[in-house]
Structure formats: structure tokens, C-alpha cells
Amino acid sequence: MQANLAKHWSLLQQHAERLKSQPLCDLFAADAERFSQFSVHLDDLLMDFSKEKIDQAALAALLQLAQAAQVEARRDAMVQGEKINSTEQRAVLHMALRDGIPAGVQVDGQDVLKEVAAVRERFLDFAEAVRTGAYKTVSGQAFTDVVNIGIGGSDLGPVMVTTALAPWHDGPAVHFVSNVDGAHSVDTLKGLNPQTTLVIVASKTFTTAETMLNFSTALAWLKASLGEQAGQHVAAVSTNLAATRSYGIEDTRVFGFWDWVGGRYSVWSAIGLPVAIAVGKQAFTEFLAGAKAMDEHFRSAPLAQNLPVLFALLGIWRRNLLQYPTVALIPYDQHLARFPAYVQQLDMESNGKRVQLDGSPIQTSTGPVIWGEPGTNAQHSFFQLIHQGSEVIPVDFLAAANPSSQSEFADLELHHETLLTNVLAQAQALAFGRDAEAVRADLQAAGLSAVQIEALVTHRTFPGDRPSTLMLYRQLTPYTLGRLVALFEHKVFVQGVIWGVNSYDQWGVELGKKLANVLAPALHDRTVPAGVDASTAGLLQHIHALRA
Ligand code: F6P
């Protein structure tokens, strides 16, 4: 814990003790204005946090914590290009990718916005050339399919955004290969025609083992059909231009970005190329504009009205004060089916940390476990546990007021009304539950005997008092999506500042990679390395036997 924050944490603990014993229904009963007091909006995007176990005094204490942690000064340092990623000595400027920083910011003597604009123009032009057929296959046809090969930030962003913007998808079909499990490559490529398929290799470092192996498989697949001309069906996105050259990928089809863009913050860069091919330049530009609007809000709105700041503080309240270890992220929006997976990387790779910036251990809990699936499906699988399980799991709901497309055969208004009634009902049930008295009355009305009623009453009681926040917006458009993703990015930033961690490195993923390199020869040669632990040795022997 940062020493100067101790008094703020201790005040917040007192508020948490007080509020723990005040059910949400009492908080609502005590304040007719609770909805307007505990909701904020940016244009049509509303964040309703009235169903969180919070009151004005606790919120004020959280805002003081943010001030004391110097959230605004740290935000300004990020925006100005200071090297706030201290363990890698890098600036953190993903906001620049959507023009969300002021003109003139430089990193190592380079004008950031100018560089961004130049690469953006190149990759959006290339996307248009693929879409229109101006960039042709070796046999002079238009590309029908694109396969993006990448993993982590070089996959999850493009997958999530392409899925979310399905109604805008009017370009070639876009496919994604990420897992090194050969099934992913084979299952994807076997349905495609190499004569009309473009492969994009997306890797910030261009050294990620999974991506390089998947690329070599795809290249072999292309070569079997196109021979030496296969390279014309390959494009790359990377910060490592020396490596793309060493793979023989022609510079005209290589789109760079910068070490000040973290992988999980890179969908706005040329990493978004498959998205731009799918939905086109205009929709991609609107996606960037939505994020820029959130950036401007984040940079200028006072803390008490600042959506990302408030969202972050609610997360701190849940995690550190009420001590809920997980968050369920439930979009009532099928197009956001991959949003929870995307936010998992964004949040858990950023704030899954146990030491502070100075290397000392953190005294508080940090990033929660984030998980989720779209509603209404989730209601029919794990919601039972959220309603009646022994742990409290706060929920972040996302919902649009309108469907994002129209249909000739489906009554999408009716579908959407049903979707919305469900999200509202779930949030209500979580917050207010159904007490034993009401359950008894229901069962009595259904004609059950007193004995039958008493046997069922505890099973059918909902404790309620389970918090949720709802993000509600007009419609899921490219602009809305950009705004939403930037909201989550800035939330992660603010929480990282309060916890005093570096949200922009990811050393925790390195050890497994190193050990995999050591074990690779053992798998290949069917040996057991000397000195390996007994469990791994036993497992290797079992694998070798099963492969015999
Ligand atoms: O292993 C984690 C990670 O480094 C992520 O941070 C990153 O998004 C992913 O791997 C892919 O890295 P690259 O884009 O360099 O292939």
C-alpha cells in the first residue's frame, strides 16, 4: 500500500463495515433519488451504479483516494508520452492511435501523431485495396478470405471487434488462428482456397512461438498451391521490421507500430487490419472516433463525473473494501460474445500484479478474476450461483437499447425487448432478491400445504443484496464499441495507479515460455531431462508411453 494512501484506505474500510450491513433495498428505500445520484452518462452511454452497495460518503472517500493517488497527474504523464511503463522504459500511448492525445507529443524525438497518421493511412489503404480487389491474388482475382494469425493482443482485439461489428461486415470473410494446437490451423484452413486467401501475420514482437509456428503452417499451405508466389498472399503487422524482412515479407505489405503500444491495447493500430478489411475504412474510423471521444472525456471530466474513474473506483470498492475476488462481465449483446475474453486479457494481464512500481510487495489485493458469457445464455448456466451461491459475485452488465441491425425475417424489436427485459430483471433479482415471507405467500397462493411450504421456503429464497452495474447505450455501432473499449482501458489505468502497479508490463507470462523451450526437446526426442521435478518427469513418461 502506498504510504500516503493509508488514511484513505482506513476511512474506506469504516465505510465498508457500515455498508456491509445495509442491504441494497434499504439504500433504495432511504433515497428516492438514488438512480440519479448514482448514475453518470457520456452522451447516450449511461453507467447505472445505483445497485452497488455504496453511498455518497463512501463515494466521496473513493474520490479522495483517487486524488491522493494522483490519478490526474499520472493520466497527464501518460498522455504526454512519459515512460510510465518503468520496467520496460516505454511510453504508453495507445490513445494516440485514435488521436486521443494533444498534437505535438513526442517520444524519443518522434512526433507521435504524425507517425500514427502515416501508418494508419497505409494500412487503411491496403484494407480498401483488398476489399475492392485492387490488390489482387496471384491469379488476378479478388481475395475472398483473410486469415489473421496472432495470439493475445494480436488476436483477441481483432476477433472481438470483428465479431462485435458483424452487421458492418461487407468485406472478405475474416478468420482467426491463434492456438498453437494444430487443430486451429487445420480446421480453419481446410475450408479455404489458398488461391484466394490472404494471410496476415500479426505479432508485435514477431518472435511469439505459437504465431511463428502457425505462420509456417499457413505458408506451407499457401506454397503448396501458389509455389514461389505464395509471398504475395502474405501481409504482416509488427514492431519488429527486421524480423518481418528476415521472413521475406515484402515491406509494402508490412505495417508497423511502436513499442509504446501494449499488445492488449493495440487493436487501434495496424493490428486492426483484419477488422478494417472486414468492415471498411469508414466503420474503422468511426470505431477510432468513439475511443477518441472517451479519451477526451477521460482527460477533461472532473473525477466525480468521469466514467472511467468512477468505474475504476467501483472496482476498487468491490475488490479491496467488500473483498469480492471476481467480477462477472455479462453483455446482453450477442455481438459482444468475445468481449469478456478481450477484457480478461486487458484487465488481468495489466493489473494481475503483486509488486508496486518500486518492486515492493503490494499490501492490498489487485486485479480481480474477470469472467463471463453473453446473456441471456448465462442465465441458463451459471447465474444460479450468482443468485444463490455462497459467494457474492458483482456483475457488470452491458446492453444496447436497440438492436444493431434489421432483418427481413426476424422481429428484431421483439427479440430485443425480450433481451432487455431479461437484463433488467436479472439486475433487479440480484439487488432485491425475494425474502422468505414473499416466497411463503407465493407458495400459499399456489395451494401448497404448510408442511410443503416450510420444506421449500429456504430453497426458494433469494438473498438479494448482490451488486451490479449496468452500462446502457443506444446501439452497438463502431463508435459505441470504440467508446466502450476505451472506457475499460482507462478503468484499468486508474486502478493500476491506485494499486501502484505497472499496468503495462507482463513479466508473468515469461516463465512458462522459457520452461516450454526447455521441455520442447524432451517432447521431440521422447526423453526426460535430468533434474526435472518428479511430477513433470512422471507426466513426460506417461506422454511418451501414450505416443508409442
Ligand atoms: O505472452 C503474452 C503476450 O506477450 C501478450 O502480451 C501479447 O499480446 C501476446 O503475447 C502476443 O505477442 P506478440 O504480438 O508479440 O506476438
Image: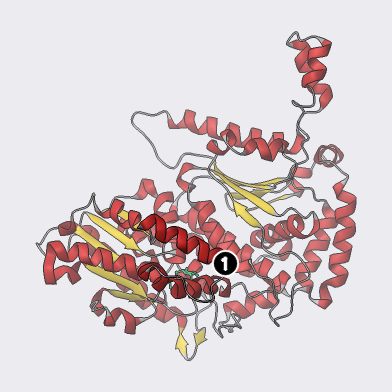
Q: Quadrant of residue 406?
A: top left
Along the viewing direction, whichever of 400 and 326 lies nearer the viewer: 326
Looking at the picture, does residue 109 appear above or below residue 154? below
Q: Is residue 284 visible?
A: yes
Residue drawn at the location 81% of the way across and 67% of the way down? 64
Give SS at disc 1: helix
Residue under label 1 = 534
Say left or right for 171 vs 75: left
Q: Is mark 1 within 8 Å of ligand 1?
A: no
Residue drawn at the location 58% of the way across and 53% of the way down? 43
| Colour theme | secondary structure
Residue flagged by tag 1: what amino acid is it?
A: Ala
Check the picture and name the quadrant holding the C terminus.
bottom left
Q: Quadrant of residue 316?
A: bottom right
Q: Is residue 96 visible?
A: no
Residue 245 position in % (x across, y down): 27, 82
Say left or right for 170 vs 97: left
Residue 176 position in % (x across, y down): 35, 57
Residue drawn at the location 49% of the way across and 54% of the way down? 481
Q: Quadrant of residue 439?
A: top right
Looking at the picture, does residue 211 appear above or below residue 105? above
- Image label count: 1
Residue drawn at the location 76% of the way across and 36% of the way down? 464
Say left or right for 282 vs 46: left
